[in-house]
Image: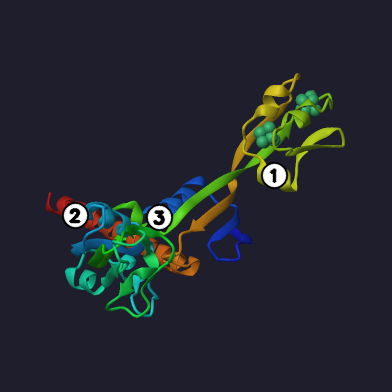
Amino acid sequence: MPKVTLMFKSRDNLYYEFFIENSDVHIMNTLRRTILAETVTLAIHDVYINQNTSVIPDEVIAQRLGLIPLRVEPSELNLTEEAAAVEPDLKRLYKLTARLRLRKINTEDATKVTKVITVYSGDLESIDKKTLRPVYDNIPIVKLGPKQEIDLECIAKVGRGKDHAKFSPVSTVAYKIMPTLNVKDNCTSCGECVNACPYNCLEMELGKPVLKSLGLYNCDLCRICVRHCPEKALEIEPNNRDFIFRIKLIGQLQIDEILDQIDAIFERKLDYLVDKIEESINEYLKQTTQE
Ligand code: SF4
Ligand code: SF4
């Protein structure tokens, strides 16, 4: 069974590093792709512009609004419900929407010294969900000159990263395969490989180069050390068994919510696969008994 250890967690709970032992590349890749493309978040999808006298066209403002990450508490809107859903259901999707409003006017007198104001994501107000808010309040949307005005309503809908990148809850999700070093008997202990490594990953121990602690963490398998060995005595390969898994969240979902969704998505997909296999076996058996 794989063993998972939390190696690092940033103070803002947005960056995590896990050390995963005894797993496999395809499992890491499934995890990565599911987090990136299958998890469900909420993002602005439709924008109704009542008034826009700024210099920015409506379409550009709508595009900017769509890219603002939104957070809603699961007690008010359960996104895992959508992640676990087998088929699209309009009733459920309608329930999983939220409305926001943005109204701002620059009341400065145009005849006086020009004063431009900036409208930020923090100026968005939720209409029907108490806990809905932009993850960051300081994303600029539009600048308003004197007497200019913006007045619009937005509908936020649920979606997945595979529909549009704005729904993805992570800015980075990646894994690094741990290296394995093999030093052959013809090593002359010259130390050239140690000097050649650009990240200082190698050190000499009992006359042989070794990868230890930070070296193991930093090695990116560039193989510069291998190319510098005059005796061709060094081999370094990915072990395809141990990994460092890194996740940088944007903030729409917390790490435990992402894990809950992955659980639901895997279960749904496996159930679907098992059902399909059972169906095809039953179909085959039916045909053979008729013959
Ligand atoms: S593969 Fe690259 S990073 Fe790793 S030990 Fe060799 S030179 Fe250093
Ligand atoms: S460069 Fe080659 S021969 Fe020299 S210490 Fe490294 S592995 Fe040994």
Disc number for residue 216: 1
Q: Specify which label sits upstream in the sequence, 1 or 2.
A: 1
Dividing the picture into quadrants, the one containing residue 221 is top right
Q: Is residue 229 left or right of residue 117?
A: right
Mark 2 neighbour class, 10 Å CA radius: few under 14, some 14 to 19, many 20 or more: few
**Gap in Å between the C-alphas at discs 1 and 2?**
52 Å
Tell me the amino acid under the disc marked 3: Thr
Secondary structure of the residue carrying numbered label 2: helix
Three-letter code, disc 2: Glu
CA–CA distance in space, label 3 to label 2? 31 Å
Q: Quadrant of residue 132?
A: bottom left
Q: Amino acid at mark 1?
A: Leu
Label drawn at residue 283? 2
- Decide if residue 95 is on the left or right side of residue 130: left
Locate residue 158 relative to residue 267 in the image: left or right.
left
Residue closer to the observer: 51 or 75: 51
Ligand 1 closer than 8 Å to the CB at disc 3? Answer: no
Q: Nearer the viewer, residue 82 or 155?
A: 155
Q: Residue at x 22, y 62 (%)?
A: 47
- Ligand 2: give its quadrant: top right
Q: Position of residue 41 (x, y in %)?
A: 35, 64
In what quadrant of the picture does the N terminus appear?
A: bottom right
The image quarter containing residue 149 is bottom left
Q: CA distance from mark 1 to mark 3?
A: 27 Å
Instruction: In the displayed orientation, state which residue is furthest to the left.
Output: 290
Q: Secondary structure at mark 3?
A: helix
Q: Which mark is residue 34?
A: 3
